[in-house]
Image: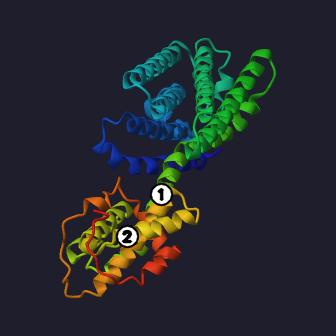
Amino acid sequence: MNGEDYYIPAAAMAVALAFKLPALRHNWRDPLLRSVCALLILAGSVFTFAAPPTIAAVNRWTGIPNVSAPLVYCLITAFSASCLVLIVNWRGGPPEQTRRVSRRWILGYGVVVVALVVLFVLGEAPEERLRDLDTYYVTTPYIREMIVLYLAAHTVAAVVMVALCWRWSLQVRGWLRVGLMIIVVGYVFNLSYDATKFTAVLGRWLGVDLDYFSTYLAPPIASLGALISAIGFVVPLVCQRAQDSWRTWATYRRLGTLWRELQGAVPLGTPGVRMAWWSPAELRVLQRESDIHDGFLHLGPYFDQRQRAQAYEQARAAGADEETARAVGDAAMVAAAVRARSADPEGRIVDAEPDPAQGAVDGPRDLVRISRALRHSPSVAAARGHHAATTGSGLR
């Protein structure tokens, strides 16, 4: 692998981090967000400092042969810890327990980082090796222990991540489960990376030349595993957000029939609250629902509870469930009220005292169901010809 193979993933991590920084600035106390940003920083750092050109540059700038080795090993170890901390915070639970488990992982891997530095200082690695230090110095005292320690720490993290994500994936559904399964696949590749490294190390110890596994096979496996794991972390967040946005826009569109029905009878959406084209879908839905409720208030004197009851009974007789029948009854009453209001342009009908016998409306109305009934229900189509202007209570 050349430098570009490392720098391109590092640049991708930097771009992802740039999108996360504004949210981090406003929600610094969010442990999940901090964990995501830490993971992105460490992942980008691993790719950057593991690139052979960077290794050579760091060695040259410091004047210490192979000083890049403990630096990269420490970054890999810290990245492993950040993945574990992210999963702990992502899964959630009692805050104190989450913080306690996160601190344990951070402390444990912090000790490993310190040990890696100490072992490098105690050992001797005078000849610079840009690609094959793991196998070249695996028989050197202290350097040998440093190599085995970082591989063991990385393997432990990969095994724990596979176990945690697999067990969690069996308890959830939807995009979260998809993301967790992708993470499992990514960490299986990470375990394959560790296996190839250990194979080459054992080969050296046994006098067999298996350096190819470490020098040429392990790096692309590691990059592929990191890419797949990153996709796994991103998929639930991005796809869930896209799904939520789709549902919001679908709600906005489905409310359109009811909104337009009321707009024909009463003025809705004054210029002061007109939505710009870039307004978020949630705000548009909120404004449309507000307009609809305002329309109900204007049509209140024209609502006919008898019309609603008749349409409700017809829907129930046709086999509709309770919620759908209620929506059909409401829609029929709205359609009749709109026609009655149109037949009374001077507004001669005034509010009357509510009739207790009519009954109150139980709970909030399902505006989407009412809007759908306005378009498809035969009872509503029949009610559109009802022009009697009556005073009654309903939808208020």
For the residue pair 104 and 365, the one nearer the viewer reads as 365
In which quarter of the view is residue 393 placed? Answer: bottom left
**Vertical comparison of 389 with 93: above or below:** below
In which quarter of the view is residue 304 placed? Answer: bottom left
Q: How is the image coloured?
A: rainbow
Q: Horizontally, is 189 left or right of 286 in the view?
A: right
User: Residue at 43% of width from left, 75% of height from top?
Assistant: 257
Q: Horizontally, is 73 left or right of 301 in the view?
A: right
Q: Along the polypeptide, which appears first: circle 2 or circle 1?
A: 2
Percent position (x, y) of residue 231? 57, 46
Residue 183 — which label?
none
| Label 2 residue SS | helix
Mark 2 near mark 1, Cβ–Cβ under 8 Å?
no
**Vertical comparison of 19 with 267: above or below:** above
| Residue occupied by mark 2 | 306
The amino acid at mark 1 is: Glu
The total number of labels drawn is 2
Q: Residues within 10 Å of mark 2 (few under 14, many from 20)?
A: some
Percent position (x, y) of residue 136? 68, 24
In which quarter of the view is residue 183 placed? Answer: top right
**Vertical comparison of 49 with 13: above or below:** above
Percent position (x, y) of residue 264? 33, 82
Residue 245 appears in view: yes
**Vertical comparison of 94 with 218: above or below:** above
The amino acid at mark 2 is: Arg
Q: Horizontally, is 180 left or right of 258 in the view?
A: right
| Residue occupied by mark 1 | 323
User: Residue at 52% of width from left, 25% of height from top?
Assistant: 70
